[in-house]
Every structure is written in structure tokens, then in C-alpha cells.
Amino acid sequence: MACTRPDCPPEQAVEFVLQEWDINSVNEVKSLPSYEDQNFRVRVVRSSEEVEFVLKISSLETEKGMIC
């Protein structure tokens, strides 16, 4: 059974990153391909250092044990 894929606009992803982590600024957010979830490559400045990571937004239908 396929899950309903999340539909989070990049602007909302930026807002989430700024609220949840000690981030000075978000330099780039790029949507990445995915199947049942939604992924963004995020480049930020944290403590004067540029850092890059993947923000994964899982479907509400995904079992918690399946999220890595």
C-alpha cells in the first residue's frame, strides 16, 4: 500500500529548520527526489560554519519503526 506523499513547500521547510535548530541562516533549500516521503537538501550557517544536511519529511502513514 502506497503512502500519501507529504506536500511541504520549500518556504515551510526553511521556517521549520529555523525554528527547530540553532541556525543563523538558511543558504539553500533544494527539493530532492523521493517516493513516499519528501526530502530537501538544506545548506545552512550554524555557529559561523556552513553545514549541509537532508531534511526528511515522512508521511503520517509511515510506521515509526520504518523511519531512519
Image (spheres, rainbow, N blue to C red):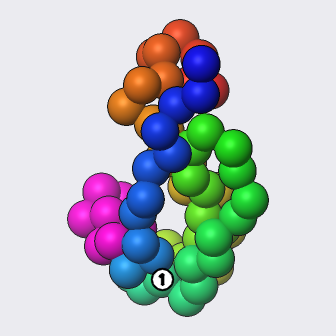
Q: Residue furthest front?
A: 1
Residue at position x 55%, y 88% in the image: 27
Numbered disc total: 1
> What is the magenta range?
12-22
The verdict on residue 28 being magenta is no
Q: Which residue is mark 1?
A: 26
Q: Amino acid at mark 1?
A: Val
Quadrant of the rendered structure where residue 55 is?
bottom right
On-image quarter of the C terminus: top right
Q: Main secondary structure of the magenta part?
A: helix
Task: Please tell me whether residue 67 is drawn above or below residue 8 in the rendered image.
Answer: above
Quadrant of the rendered structure where residue 66 is?
top right
49 left or right of 14? right
Q: Nearer the viewer, residue 66 or 22?
A: 66
Q: Residue furthest top?
A: 65
Quadrant of the rendered structure where residue 9 is?
bottom left
Mark 1 nearby-residue class (10 Å; few <14, some 14–19, many ≥20): some
Q: Nearer the viewer, residue 58 or 61?
A: 61
* Residue 43 % position (x, y): 61, 76
Residue at position x 49%, y 23% in the image: 62
Residue at position x 38%, y 80% in the image: 11
* Residue 33 % position (x, y): 74, 59
On-image quarter of the N terminus: top right
* Residue 18 visible in this rendered orientation of the protein: no
Task: Please tell me whether residue 66 is drawn above or below residue 19 in the rendered image.
Answer: above
Residue at position x 63%, y 70% in the image: 31
